[in-house]
Amino acid sequence: MMRLIVIINYCLMMFMAHSTHAHASDLPRISLQISKYMISAEMATTHRTRAQGLMFRESLAENTGMLFVFPKSAYYGMWMKNTILPLSVAFIDEKGTIINIADMEPDSLVTHRSAGPAKYALEMSGGWFASRKISAGDLVSGLEHAPVAN
């Protein structure tokens, strides 16, 4: 049964990557701020765009990333299948507080989980949060402008 699920997930990801690949210009953007740092983030608000994430991207511009907006607050996990860039992810609660941050290795199936119920996940270039001394407990502003997720 588990093997069937893995095969189905793989086929779905490959189909999405080749037939409905979302490019940076295709997704709406949101301006966010953490401490003194301004961020321009693409928004992944549907199951399809959250599943695609930053797969197959070759680069991210400075202070840009992707905001995953989930339909409800819950424990979520992120992985790096077909993602060739090292990324860091901040799991964020519905009030905008960073719950925890994880560094993720390219093309890894290791799941990085939120340490508490998250409403958002913000992926940035690997080490982005650490290099700016951003950590759990810091506030992300601008999330009130994020649309409701499907």
Image (cartoon, rainbow, N blue to C red):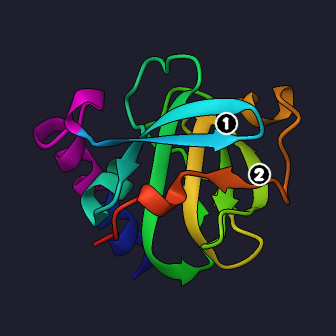
Crowd class of label 1 (few under 14; some 14 to 19; many from 20; radius 10 Å): some
- Image coordinates of residue 77 in percent, x first then y, are 59, 65
Residue on which disc 2 sits: 101
User: From this viewpoint, is residue 66 visible?
Assistant: yes
Crowd class of label 2 (few under 14; some 14 to 19; many from 20; radius 10 Å): many
Give the answer, above or below, for where 140 lies relative to 23. Answer: below
- Image coordinates of residue 129 in percent, x first then y, are 77, 36
Position of 14 compared to 70: left or right? left
- Determine whether the residue tagged by mark 1 lies in a helix, strand or loop: loop
- Kind of residue indicated by mark 1: Glu
- Determine whether the residue tagged by mark 2 lies in a helix, strand or loop: strand
Give the answer, above or below, for where 26 lies relative to 60. Answer: below
Position of 47 compared to 101: left or right? left
- Residue 20 within the magenta-colored segment of the rendering: yes
Which contiguous range is marked in magenta?
A: 10-26
Magenta stretch: dominant secondary structure: helix
Residue 88, by quadrant, is top right
Position of 76 compared to 70: left or right? right
